[in-house]
Amino acid sequence: MTVSITTDAITPALHRKAWSFALVFLPLLLPWLSLRHGAASAYPTLFMFWTPVVVFGLVPLLDYLIGKDTLNPNEEQSRVLSTQPWYRTLTLLCLPLQFASLISGAVVAVQLPGGLALLGWIVSFGTVSSVLAITVAHELIHKNEKLDQWTGGILLASVCYGGFKIEHVRGHHVHVSTPEDASSARYGETVYGFVPRAIIRNVHNAFRLEAIRLRQKGLPIWSWRNECVAWTALSGVFAVTAALLFGWHGVLFFFGQSLVAIVLLETVNYIEHYGLHRRLQADGRYERVTHLHSWNSSYRLSNLLLFHLQRHSDHHAFPKRRYQILRHFDDSPQLPGGYPTMVMLAWLPPLWFAVMNPRVRAYYGGDPDGTN
């Protein structure tokens, strides 16, 4: 695969960035490096946890060392970049790589000597799936092309969260930063209170939204036309396949990595909208979603590893905009770190509140319940 961006509109910096998005595949290598180095060490079990240590320990340090990327393509560059097949190919390639990762991971899982080693292996592959399956699916389910939609749905089914395809687009993007949204964290709420509530409400909302859609079309709710049913059934097929091929270790591995990926997804949701809200207008409707209703982060390395997911402010303002042309806005609320850094902070509520609550108050002029 070559990057064929030859137009004069594309600067050398944008051309280098095109290649750099291939870094999204780097997490795939981490479990295997941990397995290799662990086998040669006196602590092979501890090396099974090396992947999350790198992602949530080393990447934050590198983020601060490498710095931010606030480069925005202009209108002509955006038009050109949107048509380049390289960027879409990278996302679609994640589907076969995700299944290759899960199958090879399950092969090793059945051979691991003890429960702690298996736990580390599951957490590692859940971390990989959070990038390779969920981050990529998030990009694809917003697009109009059928291939993108189906690829996104299958990727989500590989982590048992197919309903996200429905609730995220038809629920979260409609109600973001309002009390009606399952994926917007309230000011002062801990991640430990948010994540279980978000998972339960998201699953429920997905089924509810599908039921409404099918009733409007005069179709039965419990049928293959119900996407929730279809994606859940596909996850069931994956689980049964894991059981047949790898026994109970394979089933535990499949569901375990799914749970880790889902928890990481909802932790990121917690980070993306914490404490932000849209004004309720005189007509009883909330103001239109803009780039002011999501936390933005423009740290270069973590953005490359996550297909610009951290330029979340622009994504919510323009959900169909492809990742390669998402923009940085100085007036969006800014996170003090990339997502790997903020995930670690979120899991330590006293530190999270110490860092983020003053930022929320400052953004709203001292009153976290106020308005922009």
Image (spheres, rainbow, N blue to C red):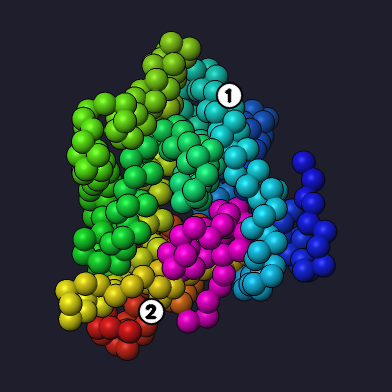
Q: Does the magenta-highlighted stretch encompass residue 51?
A: no
Above or below for 318 versus 220: below
Question: Where is 323 relative to 333, above or below?
Answer: above
Give the magenta part as a residue range: 302-331
Q: Is residue 256 left or right of residue 120?
A: left
Name the secondary structure under disc 2: helix
Residue 298 vertical placement versus 346 (above, below): below
Whole-angstrom CA distance, mark 1 to mark 2, is 43 Å
The reply, left or right, for residue 56 in relation to residue 358 is right
Side of 341 relative to 172 (left or right): right
> Looking at the rendering, which quadrant does residue 303 occupy?
bottom right
Q: Residue at x 56, y 34 (%)?
A: 95
Residue 301 at x, y percent in the picture = 63, 60
Instruction: Please name the residue that numbered disc 2 is placed on.
Output: 359
Q: Position of residue 80 (x, y in %)?
A: 70, 61
Left or right? Give the position of 107 relative to 271: right
Q: Is residue 181 visible?
A: yes
Which of pointers 1 and 2 lies earlier in the amino acid sequence?
1
Question: Where does the image place residue 272, in percent across and percent down from the top left?
Answer: 40, 63
Query: Is residue 15 shown above or below 168?
Result: below
Name the spot of residue 180 as percent of width and height, x first: 21, 61
Q: Residue at x 23, y 33 (%)?
A: 219
Is 160 in front, or is 9?
A: 9
The residue pinned by badge 1 equals 104
Q: Nearer the viewer, residue 200 or 92?
A: 92
